[in-house]
Image (tube, rainbow, N blue to C red):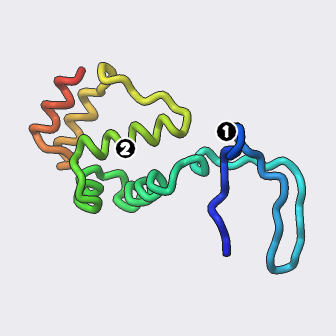
């Protein structure tokens, strides 16, 4: 049985390093220091959300339908994941008006949602 990779030490909470890789087919073992991707540090719930987001090709309306959650909840989860990956999420006053108009024209957001986003600036 395979377990999910631990990324933080359960004792001191520092980041763990992978030091051993093993092939269960031919029994080859490689030892060294290996790094995990940033995605490995996400929780199962965050990874599930990312999977839905990707299968919906980033279309927030589709993510809303798939998960049965609101547009602001989708945005909140995305912001949380962006922060968990070590990136700085865009500040509210950095909202791109052209992007909002494009999202409105493509049907990703409603007129009411566009107005809310523009008011956040």
The answer for how far apart the CA atoms under marks 2 and 1 are is 23 Å
Residue of label 1: 13
Q: Residues within 10 Å of mark 2 (few under 14, many from 20)?
A: some
Residue drawn where x is 19% and y is 26% of the image: 118
Helix, strand or loop at label 2? It is helix
Residue 42 spot, x, y in % from top left: 54, 48
Measured as percent of width and height from the top left, residue 18 is found at: 78, 51
Residue appearing at x 89%, y 56% in the figure: 31
Q: Give the secondary structure at mark 1.
A: loop
Q: Is residue 29 above or below residue 18?
A: below
Q: Which residue is mark 2?
A: 77
Q: Residues within 10 Å of mark 1 (few under 14, many from 20)?
A: few
Q: For the residues carrying marks 2 and 1, which lies nearer the camera in this image? A: 1
State whether residue 42 is above or below residue 84.
Answer: below
5 lies left or right of 60: right
The residue lying toward the viewer, choosing from 57 and 19, is: 19
Left/right of residue 107 with respect to residue 37 in the rendered view: left
> For this rendering, which residue is in front, 17 or 61?
17
Dots 2 and 1: beta carbons under 8 Å?
A: no
Q: Is residue 56 above or below residue 87?
A: below
């Amino acid at each position: 049985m395979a377990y999910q990779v631990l990324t933080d030490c359960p004792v001191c909470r520092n980041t763990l390093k992978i030091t051993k890789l093993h092939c269960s087919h031919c029994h080859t073992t490689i030892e060294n220091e290996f790094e995990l991707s940033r995605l490995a540090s996400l929780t199962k719930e965050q990874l599930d959300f990312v999977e839905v987001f990707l299968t919906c090709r980033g279309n927030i309306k589709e993510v809303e339908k798939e998960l049965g959650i609101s547009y602001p909840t989708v945005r909140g989860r995305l912001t949380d994941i962006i922060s968990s990956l070590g990136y700085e999420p865009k500040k509210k006053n950095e909202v791109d008006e052209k992007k909002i108009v494009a999202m409105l024209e493509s049907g990703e957001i409603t007129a009411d949602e566009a107005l809310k986003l523009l008011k956040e600036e």
